[in-house]
Every structure is written in structure tokens, then in C-alpha cells.
């Protein structure tokens, strides 16, 4: 019998959070080593549009050099994307591109043939054609029981076998919360 459970990819929004300095990142870790350090713990990241939109070719190549093979970058495309071209950055990322995460305002044509994840909103019907993404604040996740209930609830709402992005963000984001949620999803057979 095939396993049709969804697969949750639990990632952070960005890798440079002030709250991580001294708690996740060692105090003496140079700023330009943070992505490498993060990538040793988590297999991907959602790159905010404000960051990738202004990145040049050298910057994107630096990101790729800072991570191991298999690490995935997801590009946030918000509010129509403005003058930013996700296809150009996606081409630079090559095999390190996980996909583009769009909000409901962005037209599909902006992403071309790039794998696309759509931010799921309350009440939205999810079809088999949608790879859903959820942006959650670390502060809203609660304890492990609440996290388990969240994962099980979401697993029941998404299409069978879907790849699902859980994107964790927040001003006081704690890497321990992200790690615990990833471990819990693994224990539940959802990661």
C-alpha cells in the first residue's frame, strides 16, 4: 500500500535573525558565515523578496557556495512581484531552487515553469494542483501538543502526497522551536 501522507518541509523565513545571535549563532560567528551555519541544521530557506530581488549574480553564487548539495532556496514572491524577476534568480540558483512561494495576488505566468507553492489562506480550497505553503510565527506554535495538533490538522487538509512548506518566522524566532517542529514531523511520518 503506497504511503500518501503529505511531506512537510519545515523551514525558516530568512537565515539572519537578531534573536539567533548568541542563542543559535555563536557570538563570534562572522555574519557572512551565517547561511552556512544555518544550512548545517535546516535543508532549505525561504528567501524574502526584499533580499533576492536586490541580489546580483555574485551574491546568488555566494549563497550557493555557502550551502551543501541538496539545500533548497525558495523565493518569496509577494504582491505581484513588482519589478523583480524570479525566473532570472531561479536560473542562477539552478538545482538549489526549491520553488517560488506566491501569495494569491501573484499571477502564475510570473513564475514560468518554476515549481510553485501557494500560500494557503483560511477557507481556501486546496486542489491536487496546489502545493501549499503556510507562514506561521514561531510564537503561535505553542507547546509540542499544540504543534502535533497543527501538523495533524494540516495533514488532513492538504492533497494526498503533497509537498507542503511550513515557513516559520517571527521577531523572537527561536531555532529550538524550528528544530522541535521538524523532529515532531519526522516522528509523525510527515517529514
Image: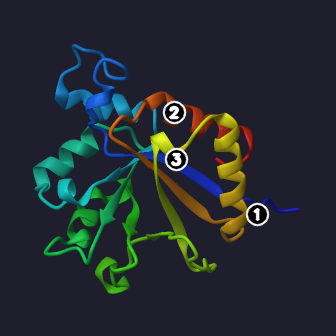
What's the residue at 10%, 56% (across, down)? 56
Q: Tell which circle, 3 or 1, labels the residue nearer the N-terminal end.
A: 1
What's the residue at 28%, 64% (across, down)? 90
Rendered-image quadrant of the N terminus: bottom right
Q: Tell which circle, 2 or 3, labels the residue nearer the N-terminal end.
A: 3
Give the Cα distance between marks 3 and 1.
18 Å
What's the residue at 37%, 66% (across, down)? 100
Tell me: residue 107, above or below residue 99.
Answer: below
Q: Secondary structure at mark 1?
A: loop
Report which residue position mark 1 lands on: 4
On the image, the x and y values in percent for residue 39 come to: 38, 35
Neighbours of disc 2 within 10 Å: few (<14), some (14-19), many (20+): some
Q: Secondary structure at mark 2?
A: helix
Give the Cα distance between marks 2 and 3.
11 Å
Report which residue position mark 2 lands on: 177
Report which residue position mark 3 lands on: 10
On the image, the x and y values in percent for residue 63 come to: 24, 44
Do the numbered discs 2 and 1 sit on residues whose CB atoms are within 8 Å? no
Outermost right residue = 1
In the figure, is residue 26 to the left or right of 59? right
On the image, the x and y values in percent for residue 128 come to: 63, 78
Amino acid at each position: 500500500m503506497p504511503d500518501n501522507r503529505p511531506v512537510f518541509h519545515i523551514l525558516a523565513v530568512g537565515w539572519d535573525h537578531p534573536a539567533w545571535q548568541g542563542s543559535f549563532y555563536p557570538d563570534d560567528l562572522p555574519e557572512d558565515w551565517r547561511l552556512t551555519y544555518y544550512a548545517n541544521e535546516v535543508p532549505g530557506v525561504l528567501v524574502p523578496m526584499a533580499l533576492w530581488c536586490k541580489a546580483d549574480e555574485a551574491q546568488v553564487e555566494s549563497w550557493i557556495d555557502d550551502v551543501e548539495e541538496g539545500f533548497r532556496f525558495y523565493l518569496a514572491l509577494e504582491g505581484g512581484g513588482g519589478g523583480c524577476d524570479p525566473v532570472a534568480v531561479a536560473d542562477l540558483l539552478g538545482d538549489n531552487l526549491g520553488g517560488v512561494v506566491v501569495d494569491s495576488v501573484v499571477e502564475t505566468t510570473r513564475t514560468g515553469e518554476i515549481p510553485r507553492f501557494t500560500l494557503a489562506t483560511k477557507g481556501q480550497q486546496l486542489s491536487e494542483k496546489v502545493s501549499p505553503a503556510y507562514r506561521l510565527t514561531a510564537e503561535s506554535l505553542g507547546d509540542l501538543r499544540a504543534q502535533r495538533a497543527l501538523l495533524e490538522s494540516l495533514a488532513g487538509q492538504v492533497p494526498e502526497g503533497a509537498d507542503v512548506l511550513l515557513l516559520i518566522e517571527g521577531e523572537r524566532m527561536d531555532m529550538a522551536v524550528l528544530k522541535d517542529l521538524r523532529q515532531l514531523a519526522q516522528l509523525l511520518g510527515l517529514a
